[in-house]
Image (spheres, rainbow, N blue to C red):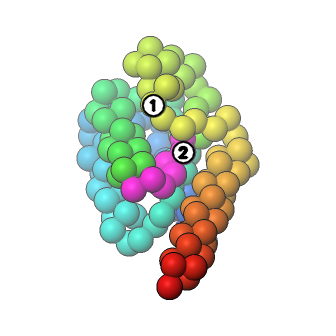
Amino acid sequence: MRYLVEKKDEYAVLTLTEENLNSVKAPILKSEFLGLKNSGIDNVILNLEQVKYVDSSGLSAILTGNRLWTEDKKSFVLTGINHPSVKMLITVSRLDSILTIAATMPEAEKIVMLRAFGDELSSEQADEEIDEEE
């Protein structure tokens, strides 16, 4: 499977450079997600801009990525869902109600940064409350 990973301060962008996300490529994507998670990446944007076909194994890989980050209250955002068959599959499977989907890369980055900023504020408030109790 061909893909690019671009790591930023608050997140990583994983861009698939394949037209198909199928049963052959899905295990590789899951493995990459695990590698990113284990390396300490807090937030991920999955860019499907070049993807024209996704099967059930591909959806499973996407859901694995979503679970890995959302169970820790971090961000997993899909973007670049441009091909009609991919849009339809996500809609028909009702994953659009589960996944965070951004229309564009700048929108995806904004979602991740707002969540990261919110997490930082929450952490600072918790630290202040601890200091006040002492």
**Quadrant assignment, res 77:** top right
Residue 31 within the segment the image draws in magenta: no
Give the residues in magenta: 72-78
The single residue placed furthest to the top in the displayed view is: 92
Tell me, for residue 98, which label it has, or none: 1
Q: Secondary structure at mark 2?
A: strand
Please state the horizontal and vertical placement of residue 45, each as a whole percent of the image. 54, 51
Residue 74 within the segment the image draws in magenta: yes
Please state the horizontal and vertical placement of residue 94, each as a whole percent of the image. 44, 20
Q: How would you rate the neighbour count of disc 2 (Cα within 10 Å): few for under 14, some for 14-19, many for 20 or more?
A: many
Q: Residue at x 26, y 47 (%)?
A: 27
Please state the horizontal and vertical placement of residue 53, each as a whole percent of the image. 44, 28
Three-letter amino acid code at the position of disc 2: Val
The answer to whether residue 48 is left or right of residue 121 is left
The answer to whether residue 69 is left or right of residue 107 is left
Tell me, for residue 77, which label it has, or none: 2
Q: Going from the N terminus, do you reach mark 1 or mark 2 first?
A: 2
Q: Residue at x 63, y 38 (%)?
A: 102
